[in-house]
Amino acid sequence: MNKKILQTLQEITPLNQNAILAAQKYQSSLAMPPGSMGELLEIGARLSGITGKLHNSLPKKRIVVLAADNGIVAEGVSSAPQSVTVSQAINMTKSLTGMSALAKHFGNEVQVVDVGIKYSYDCPQILNKNIRKGTNSFLNGPAMSREEAENAVLIGIELAKSAKSSGISVLGVGEMGIGNTTTSTAVLSVLTGLDAGEITGRGGCITDEMLLHKKEVIKKGIELNKPQKDDVIDVLSKVGGLDLAAMCGVFLGAAAEKLPVVIDGYISVVAALCAARICSNSARYFFSSHCSEEIGYKIAINELSLAPYLNLRMRLGEGSGCPLAFEIMDAACVIMNDMATFEQAKINDDYLSEIRNEPATPPMETIC
């Protein structure tokens, strides 16, 4: 593996367990029944583990969108033309897409990065880090070279490092790339060993006939290229995409920089799983957002031992779940920063002594 990537992996450390325990102890002193703020308490404690501080805030938020075209579109797996990638990448810079409209409303930054857009464009607001003009169809061999995949990962790492140096408090990871539910499913199938026919979804809306064809394309691509399950870079290079590889890099870079980072939907969660398979410590820096309707989403989020905070039947992608998750994370900070303790509220909490000594109630399984 590339030396710079390996160096980044060495910088990814486990969360600060003492800070987590201190946060949990403080939470038990807040004027409420034990655990009654649910996931907000878990978020608050994990933020403490990341920053090492009891009280945190997330004033500056950024959604990084990795845009790239996928050559597999040539095989008829998508209903949308490839030109949509560049059109929507430009529209994101104008706050005209679903994600960017939400981001503008909530005051979040959006950074659109070209790592492999096929068509030319004139938009200075897009950060040009183009590695190549789209990948190959993986029915004709590997989607890209190993070096290209590693370069995409490195771009993602650098984007996270740049975010930290710019004072960003939390990152969200989105994408724009027609055909990337096909590449994501191929990658997920290899990483989990699950049959592609069972986990392939409709992506951006396709007919029943196209769905059957999409499943066959993914199966054939995996059989042809024989990606190595235990070598994530090999998998990404053979059946993945530049967008996926760069997103994986953002997740790794965020963990190395001790930045909390939000998973969006299906493409994003597969990229996060790639990062976690490369470095298991990185996963504790990941926060979920919403439950995607793509079949493979639940598989990938379960592999990460996470559960989505919201179920809004969303399936847009782009990073559209990130602005919503940011607000939930802000709420977790409010609980830690502004809620009164029993002592401050002048409430005698002796009545809770017996309850606190009982084993913790396991969290409810999130329906997704």
Image (cartoon, rainbow, N blue to C red):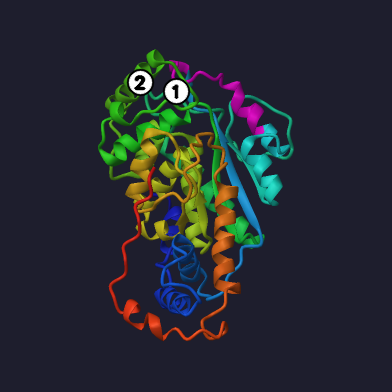
Residue at the image point whose x is 41% and y is 86% from the top: 350
State the extent of the magenta-drawn residues as a range.
74-89
Do residues under tags 2 and 1 come within 8 Å of each other at their CB atoms?
yes
The residue singled out by tag 1 in the image is 72
Rendering coords of residue 181 (x, y %) = 44, 30
Amino acid carrying label 2: it is Val
Assign a secondary structure to mark 1.
helix
The residue singled out by tag 2 in the image is 217
Which one is earlier in the sequence, the residue at label 2 or at label 1? 1
Residue at the image point whose x is 48% and y is 73% from the top: 32
Q: Nearer the viewer, residue 69 or 20?
A: 20
Amino acid carrying label 1: it is Ile
Residue at the image point whose x is 70% and y is 47% from the top: 105
**Mark 2: few, some, or many residues within 10 Å (few <14, many ≥20)?**
many
Q: Nearer the viewer, residue 66 or 22?
A: 22
In this rendering, the answer to whether 271 lies above or below 220 is below
Is 130 left or right of 264, judged from the image as shown? right
